[in-house]
Amino acid sequence: METGLLWPLVELVALAGLAGWVSELLFDTGLARGLSLIWGLIGVLAGGWIVEATGWQAGPTVAGYPVVASLAGTLLVCLVVKVVGLGLAGSR
């Protein structure tokens, strides 16, 4: 694999991992810790899509993805997962 293609992928995984880790710490979804990377990847893509669709300024970017919007998207994804988990748990 060419290093020109590898470095943006490493940056994207690092951004998604960090965003997922922070979101998991804040919301504690109660699921396996390894899923925080998946929540981060979904949140990074969702945040980038929201910025693209609304035309807002992206701010600082990592690997072409806006950092603040990626964190906000990941927080939203973890919040949805937490609410669904609470709903499935039922009343106590």
Image (spheres, grey):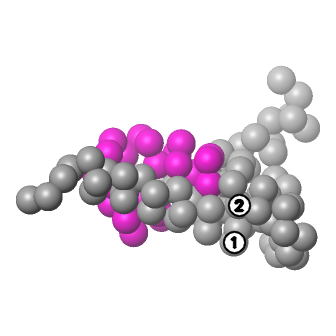
- Residue drawn at x 85%, y 62% as measured from the top left: 53
The residue lying toward the viewer, choosing from 1 and 70, is 70
Residue picked out by circle 1: 68
Give the image quarter of residue 74: bottom right
Say what amino acid the circle numbered 1 marks.
Answer: Val
Does the magenta segment cover residue 40?
A: yes
In the rendered view, does 81 fall on the left or right side of 7?
A: left
The prevailing secondary structure element of the residues shown in magenta is helix
Say what amino acid the circle numbered 2 marks.
Answer: Gly
Which circle marks residue 28 in the picture? Answer: none
Real-space CA distance between mark 2 and mark 1, rounded to the nearest whole angstrom = 8 Å
- Residue drawn at x 36%, y 52% as measured from the top left: 84
Could one spot residue 61 in this view of the protein?
A: no
Which circle marks residue 47 in the picture? Answer: 2
- Residue drawn at x 44%, y 42% as measured from the top left: 35
Up-down: is 20 above or below 59? Answer: above
Q: Position of residue 6 (x, y in %)?
A: 80, 36
Q: Earlier in the sequence, mark 2 or mark 1?
A: 2
The mark closer to the camera, 2 or 1, is 2
Give the image quarter of residue 64: bottom right
Instruction: Tell me the magenta residue range.
Output: 22-43
Does the magenta segment cover residue 39?
A: yes
